[in-house]
Image (spheres, rainbow, N blue to C red):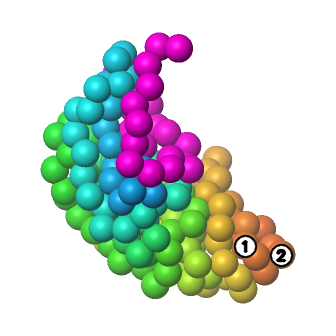
Amino acid sequence: MLWRHRLGGGAYGLPLVSESVVFSASTDRFLYALNARDGSVLWKRDLGAASEVGVALVDGLVIAGANDGGVQAYSAMSGRPVWRYQTRGPIRGGPVSCEGSVFVGSDDHGVYAISSEGQLEWRYVTGGQVLGAPGCAAGRIYAGSTDGALHAFLVSKELAP
């Protein structure tokens, strides 16, 4: 084993590795930036609520979602808070970065497209909770829902629902 760093809670989401930094959100309410070589803490920020999802990177920002419905952006370099967007339910899917935007799924049945500046681009309401992270390929976003359907969206801001 190369290293081990004990977090204050569970790390359920997929960690993000960028350059020499590992980013991970935890059920202890914190977002961690760890040195990939030795596991030392570079910075740690309070999300305000537990997180059970992975993190994304867009335009130099680390994006984290939490159980209070918050989607938050921090400078990947310093951990400085940049913006926060509030959804209507706990974030259970995502965040996923695709073509300069961030996509998340929520318990409120919504799939959200949020700009890298933290502004809502669009929201689509499915017939059930969106519990998994959306997928991104060829200019499209795909999101499953507990309504039993797979939903597909164009990433393009001009053609959004």
Q: Which residue is mark 1?
A: 145
Dot 1: element? loop
Q: In the figure, 127 relative to 81: above or below?
A: below
Q: Which residues are magenta?
A: 1-24
Q: Is residue 65 left or right of residue 149?
A: left
Q: Which mark is residue 11?
A: none
The structure residue drawn at horizontal position 42% and vertical position 63%, both measured from the top left corner, is: 50
| Label 2 element class | loop
Q: Residues within 10 Å of mark 2 (few under 14, many from 20)?
A: few
Left or right of 138 in this view: 120: left
The residue identified by callout 2 is 148
Tally the numbered discs.
2
Q: Position of residue 97 (x, y in %)?
A: 47, 50
Query: Is residue 57 at all visible to an observer of this figure?
Result: no
Question: What amino acid is found at the position of numbered circle 2 in the picture?
Answer: Gly
Q: Amino acid at mark 1?
A: Ser
- Relative image position of residue 139 (x, y in whole percent): 59, 52
Q: Is residue 125 above or below residue 43?
A: below
Side of 88 where 146 appears, left or right: right
Residue 67 shows in the view: yes
Residue at 55% across, 49% down: 13
Estimate the spatial distance between the alpha carbons at disc 2 and disc 1, rounded to whole Å.
6 Å
Q: Nearer the viewer, residue 25 or 3?
A: 3
Residue at image position (43%, 19%) is 3
Magenta-colored segment: predominant secondary structure? loop
Is the C-beta separation of discs 2 and 1 under 8 Å? yes
Q: Is residue 93 above or below residue 122?
A: above
Q: Does 34 sit left or right of 55 as displayed?
A: left
Residue 36, x across and y down, in percent: 38, 22
